[in-house]
Amino acid sequence: MKAKHQRLTLALLALVALVGAGLLGAYALQDQASYFYTPSDIVEKKPEAGTAIRLGGMVEEGSIERSADGVTVHFIVQDGTARQKVTYTGITPDLFVEGSGVVADGRLDGQGLFVAETLLAKHDENYIPRELEGIDMTSSEHKTETLVQ
């Protein structure tokens, strides 16, 4: 066999190996993929119960209810057109309040309730920690010089 044919054969084998590795990796990760849904998407696409999804939207005002056990929270996520009931068992993030953004990883149960496994609270660029809410950071008593003279 000529050297040119050997190089061509090796290149084709390498290409087949790369494609095979890519397909194997995609197959292995297909059950781990978590697609982002808004409440409107859940109404339109109706994902199967038990499918891992990521729900995002705003926590509806007046919807947060805490159970007597102290760790279970029921609330509604809305996106302006649709609403989705959610339940979460665990410690909620500090930024989790009514009217704020939330992203929840979980699954729909048979009755259409979203059971969250993890909960992430989102904030906008104007976020101020609760400890600093009443402080005017523009006043001269809070300013410090950083240049050495």
Image (cartoon, rainbow, N blue to C red):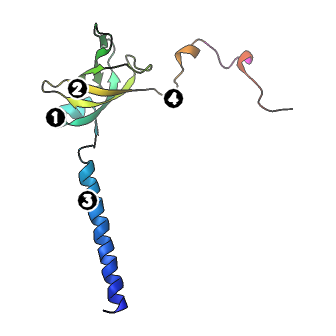
Query: What numbered label is drawn on residue 125?
Result: 4
Residue 81 in view? no
- Mark closer to the chain start, 2 or 4: 2
- In the rendered image, which quarter contains the N terminus? bottom left
* Point 31% across, 71% down: residue: 15
Task: Give the CA separation, mark 1 to mark 3.
Answer: 28 Å
Q: Residue furthest top?
A: 68
Looking at the image, residue 44 sits to the left or right of residue 98; the answer is left
Q: Residue 66 in the image: x percent, y percent? A: 31, 11
On the image, numbered disc 1 is attached to which residue?
A: 46
Q: Indicate the secondary structure of the residue bearing disc 4.
A: loop
Looking at the image, residue 115 sits to the left or right of residue 127; the answer is left
Q: Residue 13 in the image: x percent, y percent? A: 30, 75
Q: Predominant secondary structure in magenta?
A: loop
Q: Which residues are magenta?
A: 135-140
- Mark closer to the chain start, 2 or 1: 1
Q: Residue furthest front?
A: 1
Task: Give the CA separation, mark 2 to mark 4.
Answer: 28 Å
On the image, numbered disc 2 is attached to which residue?
A: 114
Is residue 122 part of the magenta span, yes or no?
no
* Point 29% across, 15% down: residue: 72
- Mark closer to the chain start, 4 or 1: 1
Image position of 37 with respect to 142: above or below: below
Q: Residue furthest bottom?
A: 2
Task: Give the CA separation, mark 2 to mark 1.
Answer: 12 Å
